[in-house]
């Protein structure tokens, strides 16, 4: 029996690399992220790889948990619901709004 991928959600902190302008002039940002993975370690790797493509480094990962059907049925913020739908359609890493900051 093949292991099933699970949808995961987390709140992450990022830091922008020198010379990158994805976040404008900001040092870093916080955002929600959703992706599918076999376990939390693979979820973290997928998030780090997606951030790497944007020129960002992962600095923290909080409130990481699998998204269950009962959790979805309890009502989710629209942004998270859209992110889940995107991941289900194209098995990607979906980021929410990046809330920038200038804290080192």
Image (cartoon, helix red, strand yellow):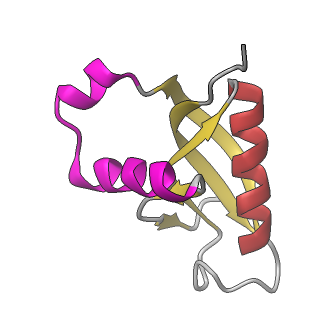
Which quadrant of the view contains residue 39? top right
Q: Residue at x 67, y 86 (%)?
A: 21
Image: 32 above or below 71: below
Q: Is residue 71 above or below residue 10?
A: above
Q: Residue furthest toward the top?
A: 1
Q: Nearer the viewer, residue 42 or 18?
A: 42
Q: Residue 23 location, x and y as percent?
A: 58, 78
Report the front residue among 103 and 36.
36
Q: Nearer the viewer, residue 33 or 23?
A: 33
Question: Is 19 rendered above or below residue 77?
Answer: below
At x 59% / y 75%, what residue is drawn?
A: 26
Q: Quadrant of the N terminus?
A: top right
Who's the residue at 80% across and 72% down the image?
17
**Does residue 87 show up magenta in the picture?**
yes
Q: Is residue 69 magenta?
A: yes
Q: Residue furthest front?
A: 1
Residue 102 in view (yes/no): yes
Residue at 60% over, 60% down? 103
Rendered-image quadrant of the C terminus: bottom right
Is 40 on the left-hand or right-hand side of 63?
right
Q: Is residue 13 left or right of residue 82?
A: right
Q: Which residues are magenta?
A: 68-90
Q: Is residue 59 left or right of residue 88?
A: right
Secondary structure mostly seen in the magenta stretch: helix
Task: Give the x, y percent position of residue 47.
Answer: 69, 49
Specify whether residue 32 is in view. no
- Picture coordinates of residue 25, whole percent (x, y): 61, 84
């Amino acid at each position: 029996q093949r292991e099933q991928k699970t949808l995961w959600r987390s709140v992450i902190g990022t830091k922008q690399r020198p010379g990158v302008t994805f976040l404008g002039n900001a040092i870093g940002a916080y955002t929600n992220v959703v992706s599918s993975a076999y376990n939390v370690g693979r979820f973290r790797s997928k998030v780090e790889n997606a951030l790497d493509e944007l020129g960002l480094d992962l600095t923290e990962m909080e409130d990481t948990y699998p998204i269950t059907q009962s959790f979805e049925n309890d009502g989710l913020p629209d942004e998270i619901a859209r992110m889940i739908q995107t991941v289900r359609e194209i098995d990607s890493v979906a980021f929410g709004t990046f809330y920038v900051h200038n804290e080192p």
